Every structure is written in C-alpha cells, then in structure tokens.
Amino acid sequence: MESVGEVFEQLELKYCERCGGLWLRNKGEQEVYCPGCVPKMAEFPESRRRRRVLVVAVNSLEELEGCTAELFSTEGGNA
C-alpha cells in the first residue's frame, strides 16, 4: 500500500480553466478542466482556432513604439 506522501508526489495542483476551482490531477496529464466541468465543456464544439505568436525584431525603442502603434491602430478596423 502506498503512503499518502507517495500518492501526493504523483499529483499536481491545478486550477480549472472554466470555473477557477482547484483540483488535483496526475502529473503529466494535460486536462485543464476539473472533473465537474469536463462534461459541461464536452457540450461545446472543439475549438479550431489556434493562437499565433508574432515575433518582431526591433533595433530601437522608437522602432518598437512604431510597431506597436501599427499593430494596435484603431484606424480602418473591422470591429
């Protein structure tokens, strides 16, 4: 029989990305929802949207400010 300490070494504390509650999951698992939220999230279609990372190389602070102004410009938007 495993001791309590050995059991806890195999677990990690995780917050649920739906309800914000804390729960324990096995180390290495990728589940992001607590057991109570898994069935609720299964009702939604799986997201096909992927996050994209934008990498910008700049040589100066002024160049960086120009890039951010261009990225976050409110002119001509489709919002």
Image (cartoon, rainbow, N blue to C red):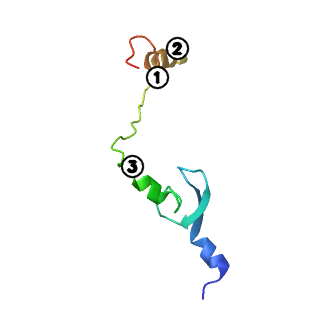
Q: Are circles 1 and 3 on residues that touch, CB within 8 Å?
A: no
- Residue labelled with disc 1: 58
Mark sitting earlier along the chain (3/2): 3
Q: Is residue 20 left or right of residue 39?
A: right
Q: Which residue is mark 3?
A: 44
Alpha carbon separation for disc pair 3 and 2? 44 Å
Residue placed most toward the observer, 67 or 45:
45
Amino acid type, label 1: Val
Residue 38 at x, y percent in the picture: 47, 58
SS class, disc 3: loop
Give the distance between the C-alpha atoms of the residues marked 1 and 3, in whole angstroms: 41 Å
Q: Are marks 3 and 2 in contact (CB under 8 Å)?
A: no
Rendering coords of residue 47 (x, y %):
36, 45
Q: Looking at the picture, tell me which residue is in the foreground, 58 or 9.
A: 9
**Quadrant for the C terminus in the image:** top left
Residue 51 position in % (x across, y down): 40, 39
Give the residue pinned by disc 2.
Answer: 62
> On the image, which quarter does residue 48 sit in?
top left
Task: Kindly give the residue lying farthest to the top in the view shown.
Answer: 75
Residue at image x 66%, y 77%?
A: 5
